[in-house]
Amino acid sequence: MKDIRIKNYRYTLYLLVTVFGWGIMYPASKHAVSSGIDGYYLTFIRYVLGAFLVSFVLLIIEGKKSYQTEGKAFQLWLFGTIGFAGLNFLTFIGIGFSSAEHATIILALMPMLSMILSSILDHNIPDIKTILCIVLAFVGIILVITNGDFNNLIASSSFLGDLLLLAATTCWVIYTYFANMMITKHK
């Protein structure tokens, strides 16, 4: 029983670290972009350093066997690039035109976008209640972003940034969908 509690505390800690990391991403990105650091460089620096760090940890923990791609190197590269580089690059560019608040709100669309993507690709249309909730959530997010004035949606100087942030979020949704498909087919 004690081992289960220790594992649960560890998993809770992992989730808190993840939430903290995602939570500071947009304010930190906005600050970096506002300070004059280009989105291209931010993406490059983040992923070069991240790739070395993750590769080192993976090598130590799992050994050389963890680098076997099982013939899926291109798929791993493609969806990894879409997910990680697409999310961050478009976020860094988009946040230069928008705000950290808008980015965080748009990120909240991820579960809805995931449901829409899986419904389209799996040919599994959700029931009417689910569709209604998705529509209401989209309207709610637009209301929050525009402060209730729909004229702000078109006239806002952050419209382009918000579209780029939506594209960034969509990149991550595409990555997670296809990563899950690859894992499911592997089992």
Image (cartoon, grey):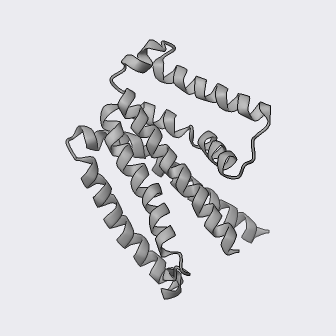
Task: Residue 73: tell me if it is visible.
Answer: yes
The answer to whether residue 13 is visible is no
Residue at the extreme left: 36
Please indicate whether residue 165 sits to the left or right of residue 48 in the image.
Answer: right
On-image quarter of the C terminus = bottom right
Determine which quarter of the picture holds residue 85: bottom left
The picture places residue 49, in percent across and down from the top left corner, at 32, 66
Residue 168: image quadrant is: top left
Residue at point 66%, 74% (across, down): 186
- Up the image or down, 110 lies above or below 121; here it is above
Q: Residue at x 35, y 62 (%)?
A: 47
Position of residue 40 relative to residue 55, above or below, is above
Estimate the x, y position of residue 45 in percent, counting from the top left. Answer: 28, 60
Image coordinates of residue 124 in percent, x first then y, are 75, 47
Residue 151 left/right relative to 158: right
Residue 99, image quadrant: top left
Residue 79 higher or lower than 38, as above or below: below
30 or 39: nearer the eye? Answer: 39
Tally the numbered discs. Answer: 0
User: In the figure, is residue 124 to the left or right of 150?
Assistant: right
Q: Which is nearer the eye, 19 or 171?
A: 171
